Image: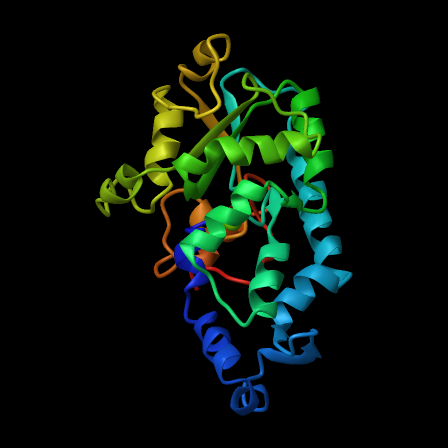
């Protein structure tokens, strides 16, 4: 996704934070606040209730992954790579959102990193079956996440604990570094995941989970076969502000796949 931390501070999230502090005044005036309350009497946003309790969310995400599976070639070449975001694409962090809202709190980098370190995120509905197919067909996955690179080991351990069929040979974890942001030049590097996509193509990528055995696999040029995420900036060369939906649409369902995430974003 574009940036979990930044996105969580988006303009859509701020009203919730403010309302959480002044609950009585806000609950009746903000459409995003639902009547549901917890023991501490802080309301959950409709977005979090949708993501954690609705039948629509798992149906939609499973459908997107079923479509992505259909779009996979029968066998993938060693140079092919599926580029996936992590948060709300592979890992479901709605429990973090739920806990913060229940406390009347919003995002903070400290609480977010503490959540990552717990390694308790669950799998997004549909992703396990998709990854099983990718691996069965000889495919490779690059997880381009805006979690800080220092958290990559915890992310990797969380993924393995879910029983996903991932190894250092078939999966490369790429958390965000400061360079990912400073490299943005508005020309060849448009968003903060483009540098890593470019490194994947060139074979210069630095996988956090690499081993001596897996390194040569990733130190080779790659073709980005698919891009999957919950944020428009999980796609190469676009920004939330300037993305052209009409231009992207012909690729959606073929090489681009977008998952629902009403909880936060770069919008
Ligand atoms: Mg995401």
Q: Residue at coordinates 30% horizontally, 46% vertically from top-left?
A: 190
Rendered-image quadrant of the C terminus:
bottom left
Can residue 159 be seen by looking at this rendering? yes
**Hey, which residue is sitting farthest right in the picture?**
55
In this view, the residue in front, 108 or 88, is 108
**Hey, which residue is sitting farthest front in the picture?**
40
Asked where in the image residue 130 lies, by quadrant, the reply is top right
Side of 89 relative to 106 (left or right): right
Asked where in the image residue 168 lies, by quadrant, the reply is top right
Q: In this view, does 16 lie above or below 133?
A: below
Q: Is residue 200 above or below residue 18?
A: above
Residue 145's spot in the image, x, y percent? 46, 40
In this view, the residue in front, 8 or 96, is 96
In this view, the residue in front, 17 or 54, is 17
Can residue 83 be seen by looking at this rendering? no
Residue 118's spot in the image, x, y percent? 58, 43
Q: In this view, does 174 lie above or below 57?
A: above
Q: Residue at coordinates 41% horizontally, 53% vertically from top-left?
A: 109
């Amino acid at each position: 996704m574009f940036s979990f931390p930044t996105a969580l501070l988006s303009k859509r999230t701020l009203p919730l934070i403010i309302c959480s502090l002044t609950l009585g005044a806000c609950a009746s005036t903000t459409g995003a606040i639902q009547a549901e309350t917890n023991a501490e009497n802080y309301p959950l946003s409709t977005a979090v209730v949708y993501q954690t309790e609705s039948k629509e969310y798992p149906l939609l995400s499973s459908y997107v992954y079923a479509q992505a599976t259909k779009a996979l070639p029968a066998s993938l070449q060693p140079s092919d790579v599926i580029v996936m975001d992590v948060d709300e694409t592979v890992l479901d962090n709605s429990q973090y959102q739920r806990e913060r809202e229940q406390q009347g709190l919003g995002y903070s980098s400290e609480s977010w990193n503490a959540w990552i370190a717990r390694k308790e995120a669950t799998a997004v509905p549909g992703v396990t079956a998709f990854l099983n197919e990718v691996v069965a067909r000889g495919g490779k996955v690059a997880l381009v996440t805006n979690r800080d690179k220092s958290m990559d080991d915890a992310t990797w351990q969380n993924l393995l604990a879910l029983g996903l069929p991932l190894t250092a040979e078939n999966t490369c974890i790429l958390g965000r570094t400061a360079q990912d942001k400073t490299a943005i030049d508005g020309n060849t590097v448009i968003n903060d995941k483009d540098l890593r996509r470019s490194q994947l193509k060139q074979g210069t990528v630095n996988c956090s989970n690499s081993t001596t055995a897996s390194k040569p696999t990733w130190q080779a040029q790659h073709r980005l076969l698919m891009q999957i995420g919950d944020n428009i900036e999980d796609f190469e060369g676009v920004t939330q502000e300037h993305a052209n939906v009409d231009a992207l649409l012909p690729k959606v369902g073929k090489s681009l796949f977008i998952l629902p995430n009403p909880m936060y974003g770069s919008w």
